[in-house]
Amino acid sequence: MHHARLLALALTALLGAIPVACSRKGPAAAMDSGAARADAAPTALGATDAASSATTASGKKPSPISTAKVPLDKAAARAYADALRTGRKETVAKRWDAAIAAFDAALRALPRDARALSERGHAKLLAGRLEPARQDLREAESLTKDPKLLAQIHYNHGLVAEKLGRPDEARGSFARSNALAPTKAAAAKLGGKSCEAVVEIGRGNTVVVKDWLGMYDALRPAQSSHDGEVRPATDAAAKDRLCSRVPLGRCTDLAGFSEQAELTSWSFHPVLKVPEGFLVGRDELSSRFDLPCGGDENLDVKDAAGLRVLRLENATGMRIPVCEADGGELAGCGPDDVPVSSACGRGAPEVTVVIFDLVKNRLLATVRHSTEGGKKAPTVTVTGRILQVTGGGCDVKSEL
């Protein structure tokens, strides 16, 4: 990353830099070394304006990013590095609980660090704790742009999906991992196939519910992962919760589910209004974490040939660490550098296309892909009742 671009990034008003009082050279704290980048532009036709999409159903803009200084002293940096090293040793020794406890300690020293979250997710995966592993990996993914770390995260996403019996999702994760940083392990999982999109046809995990409270209960995990969860008491409260993060108030097309009392972690799910109430897709389309950097969602909905096509573009906000180079200029951080500040930017948009049959009231297909790594994303088109996914190693054509 060129210094000039980093300086422009740090000075942009939208970034709301969050200073961290540290020097460039410090304890080997292995911080996320992702490159800083400006807001990513929409990558496909039909995307709504990013500014309007950031407005919630209530008409309010998300809260501004805090610019308060958050000191990170040398003791915290050393505690982080020591805990990370211990967690890796315990993982190799197959002492999963001890490994997870060590990564917990690393995250107490440096909260919401992508690398520690990723490695804790890996330890949970190995321990068979699949849903908690998915949550850690998703959060880690939203906090870094380091291609090598993202490749590791997506590979572990693939392993989780395999264990959950989701082969299409697993293949898409392995393909994304291999595109970011090619490895023999990812290539072996792909078996020569390189399509980076996850294409699922005719296997929608859906449920019909009669009201908003039923929708909340259908999307809530069997065991809540947050002690602070406050279940909505009324149908109106459930609607407010599910609609609060949906762009342009389109909450009969998309639900934003959060089980956190502070409402910072969201998963997006497709919705279709049916005579009995709502047809809800239980599988997550994409997710985001509002803290510390928010993000933008664009939703485009079109009806044609008895089909409803939803296109969701989700550009997650993320904290990007920056370090001070010679001469006082800002530069990307190396693995042994401690950042002097961080800035908020946008990740590469993740795109999901969902297709409903409006006559039979069922979910026909879902296609997910990302623009990570700067490579050309697959193109998704629906002509009549023909779905095509081309490019990015994909060549899918299916009649719906």
Image (tube, helix red, strand yellow):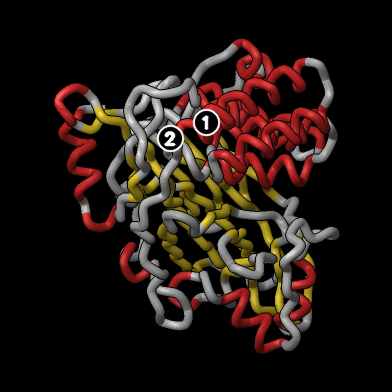
- Mark 1 and mark 2 residues within 8 Å of each other at the beta carbon: yes
> Picture coordinates of residue 190 (x, y %)?
65, 21
- Which quadrant: the C terminus? bottom right
Q: Position of residue 255 (x, y in %)?
A: 61, 69
Judge left or right: residue 378 versus residue 272.
left
Q: Residue 138: x percent and y percent? A: 60, 44
Which residue appears at 61% of the width and 40% of the height? 107
Q: Closest to the observer: 204 or 136? A: 136
Res. 267 image quadrant: bottom right
Residue 24 located left or right of residue 258: left
For the point 73% across and 37% down, the residue is 161
Residue visible at 44% across and 65% down? 300
- Kind of residue at disc 1: Leu
Q: Which mark is residue 168?
A: none
- Residue 195 spot, x, y in % from top left: 55, 30
Query: Residue 244 versus residue 356: which sits nearer the camera?
Result: 244
Few, some or many residues within 10 Å of mark 2 (<14, 14–19, 20+): many
Residue 67 in view of the camera: yes
Towards the viewer: 279 or 213: 213
Query: On residue 150, which mark appears?
Result: 1
Residue 385, relative to residue 220: is it above or below? above
> Distance between the Cα atoms at labels 1 and 2?
7 Å
Could you tell me the amino acid type at mark 2? Answer: Lys
- The earlier-in-sequence mark between 1 and 2 is 2
The residue pinned by badge 2 equals 145
